[in-house]
Amino acid sequence: MARHTVGRMSEQLPPQKTCPDCGGRGTVDWETPAGDQVTTQCSGCGGTGTVLA
């Protein structure tokens, strides 16, 4: 039976990279057809700023 060593969690997580849609900010700025500036959570990464590599 393999024993898990404390502090090795990061090695078990899938590799991640900066979200290309928001550049790692987790939010996206866009303009509505009416011309209003809106900031929303990035749908590409769910607001985390990273995606699976």
Image (cartoon, rainbow, N blue to C red):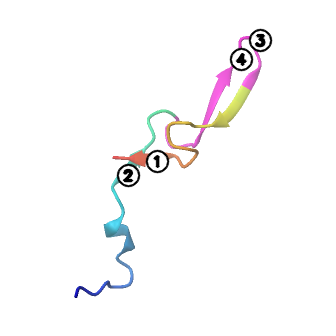
Quick check: is 27 in the magenta stretch? yes
Vertical arrangement, residue 52 with respect to residue 20, above or below:
below
Q: Which residue is mark 3?
A: 34
Image point (58%, 37%), residue name: 42
Q: Position of residue 20 (x, y in %)?
A: 44, 35
- The crowd level at tag 3 (other Cα within 10 Å; few <14, some 14-19, many 20+) is few
Q: Earlier in the sequence, mark 1 or mark 3?
A: 3
Contact? badges 1 and 2 (CB < 8 Å)? yes
Q: Earlier in the sequence, mark 1 or mark 2?
A: 2
Q: Which residue is mark 4?
A: 32
Is disc 3 placed on a helix, strand or loop? loop
Q: Earlier in the sequence, mark 2 or mark 3?
A: 2
- The crowd level at tag 4 (other Cα within 10 Å; few <14, some 14-19, many 20+) is few
Instruction: Identify the image quadrant of residue 34.
Output: top right
Query: Distance of mark 4 from mark 1, alpha carbons?
Result: 25 Å
Q: Which residue is mark 2?
A: 16
Contact? badges 3 and 4 (CB < 8 Å)? yes
Q: Earlier in the sequence, mark 4 or mark 1?
A: 4
Q: Residue furthest left?
A: 1
Query: Distance of mark 1 from mark 2, alpha carbons?
Result: 6 Å
Q: Earlier in the sequence, mark 2 or mark 4?
A: 2
Q: Position of residue 1 (x, y in %)?
A: 22, 88
Is disc 4 placed on a helix, strand or loop? loop
Instruction: Identify the image quadrant of residue 26.
Output: top right
- In magenta, the rendered stretch is 22-37
- The crowd level at tag 1 (other Cα within 10 Å; few <14, some 14-19, many 20+) is many
Query: Distance of mark 3 from mark 4, alpha carbons?
Result: 5 Å
Contact? badges 1 and 3 (CB < 8 Å)? no
